[in-house]
Image: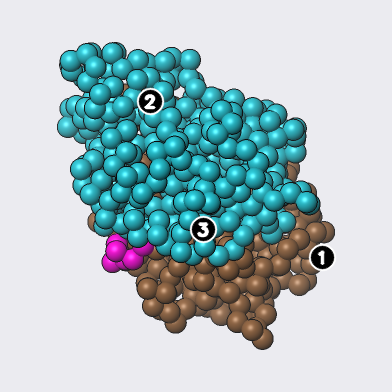
Chain colours: A cyan, B brown
Amino acid sequence: MSVRNVKILGVGKYLPKKAVMSEEIDHRLRKKCGWTEKNIGVTKRYFIKNETASSMGAYAAKEAVKHAGIKLEDISCIICASGSMEQPIPCTASLIQKELGLEKSGIPSFDINSTCLSFVTALDTLSYLVEGGRYENVLIVSSEIASVGINWKDDKSAALFGDGAAAVVLGKTPLQENSKIIYSKMMTFSEGAHLSEIYGGGSKFPPNLHNLTEETKEQFLFSMDGVKIFKMARKIMPNFVNTIWKESGLTIDDITLVIPHQASKSSMELIRKHLNIPKDKWFSIVKNHGNMIAASIPTALYEAIKEEKIKRGDVVILLGTSAGLSLGGLLFEY
Amino acid sequence: MSVRNVKILGVGKYLPKKAVMSEEIDHRLRKKCGWTEKNIGVTKRYFIKNETASSMGAYAAKEAVKHAGIKLEDISCIICASGSMEQPIPCTASLIQKELGLEKSGIPSFDINSTCLSFVTALDTLSYLVEGGRYENVLIVSSEIASVGINWKDDKSAALFGDGAAAVVLGKTPLQENSKIIYSKMMTFSEGAHLSEIYGGGSKFPPNLHNLTEETKEQFLFSMDGVKIFKMARKIMPNFVNTIWKESGLTIDDITLVIPHQASKSSMELIRKHLNIPKDKWFSIVKNHGNMIAASIPTALYEAIKEEKIKRGDVVILLGTSAGLSLGGLLFEY
């Protein structure tokens, strides 16, 4: 257990201009009106119109930088922490740097990817570099376009995902303040590596070598075995969370808010009960955002801060699963 | 400047079974026999036959783990540091974990991507987590399949690239030993973001939305403006390297070996001269490997260690450019 004296200095978010209501999803999926809201728990999500991952990321970043009270030039490192990419080459962080007008700045920019947990992994990892004095103000951006990879034949995942971006600025905690990362843990169980995936588009199934047929098209789309993932999560999550409590020395009573990855409402609710987390400490934004891949957790963090669900001094846990299959937990004093 | 007391405990590499000689490339590019060797400086490179990025990565990892004198179960974190990916979801580190038979281990696994500099960025970044006591033995794997993304209409890049993988195990330096990372620096200038790229395949130009025509096919392939990259590198590299010498307090006289990213022989040679680095301190493997994207630097490091060009106590610099456009330098005592 190693505490890092870092502080979330600012947060930002961006949602695409196009809000998509669940009636529209019901219609597209040929479901009865109300199906999506009832079964997935999502009323509204956003799909890009003309936005790119880097333009959304830059909007969120600008708000986070302003909220932190710094200038763009004060950023010492840019991390893109997303499960989706804008282009295979270069990394998306570089494209975000360009969108921010920092193309001559030299600010080091690279990507960290653990799919839906990318933000948690980046926050966790970069905190050591801030603590170690390498970087002063780290900008972490999660910007996701899920809508282009939706398989509309798979109603449960199609109804769940949305696009958007969120960003934080992470810096060293000023003297006489108490903000810190208290504890963090990640575990990967690749026996679940193919339970949620996009099979095609990388070196195993390159887009330039496969003509687009009905069959190959599906290889480029997201697929998940929701039931198996849920079963696996239910099996390994309690041990994981118990380890967090045990190793951190904290309990749920010390926590002001749990910010989970935003999966479907029903599966989140089952996991919450399974982990014995009181309803009033469990923060969900899935109803109005859907699952935004890695942008889910920082967007929920943004909302929790703006809605004053968490204040300086409160202890918060970020908690989630991701394709891989990975588990992540990060305890911090805001 | 912050020294990290970390040690490269072991190295490994894997080359695909299929060696491709430059005569074959000459023929495919409809060039006179000898063109590739003369103009690009590559005699041999390897292309995958039935290998995947994760299978190659696992082979290299096993050798590195053995060389480090540890067991697979002793790995505390797996980083895939590649510029190409096996699948868009999940991250390649998770697929490597599975190939290593560690699918039930829980070992945290994620990707770090700064294109050709991914290995240097991962080594640099994770050294802080080893130093901070978070992870004991970090496995960093760069596994690249460049061959599937080659645009055979672009002779200079087509003749340059090769596939392969390399891995290192990074751990804390034992007491009374001196291995350390002395200094590291990264800079990104996204004004060069589109000088080398794969435009299509991500959210901006998704493979599922574009039928494969001669025109769209090229969007999924690698393109680079070699002349502009070289001009940009020649302009910004000397300042970058001078900053490294100035901030680290070292000079080229303190260095046993420079391990550069493996670009074409002629551009490497021009950069070497421009940086005033003596020929005998400049280590190139491009002749027998080609440019292996992020696997280039760790493969060269592997060869330098195996050929005893560097021994414990020697000071080495890893130095390169990558799409982004980024510059990276890392000084370490082996």
Residue, x 32% and y 38% (percent of image)? A269
Q: Is residue A225 above or below residue B297?
A: above
* Disc 1, SS: loop
Magenta segment includes B52 = no
Image position, residue B105 (x, y; %): 33, 66
In depth, the one of A329 and B210 nearer the eye is A329
In whole angstroms, how far apart are the C-alphas of marks 2 and 3? 30 Å
Segment colored magenta: B100-106
Residue, x 31% and y 17% (percent of image)? A22
In whole angstroms, how far apart are the C-alphas of marks 1 and 2? 56 Å
Q: Quadrant of residue B97?
A: bottom left
Badge 2 sits on which subunit? A
Left or right placement of residue B332 versus residue B246 in this view: left
The quadrant of the picture occupied by the N terminus of chain A is bottom right
Residue, x 78% and y 71% (percent of image)? B253
On the image, numbered disc 1 is attached to which residue?
B249
Q: Residues within 10 Å of mark 3 (few under 14, many from 20)?
A: some
Viewer-nearest of labels 3 and 1? 3
Badge 3 sits on which subunit? A
* Disc 2, SS: helix
In whole angstroms, how far apart are the C-alphas of marks 3 and 1? 45 Å
Q: Main secondary structure of the magenta part?
A: loop
Viewer-nearest of labels 2 and 3? 3
Residues at marks 3 and 1, common chain?
A: no
On the image, numbered disc 2 is attached to which residue?
A287
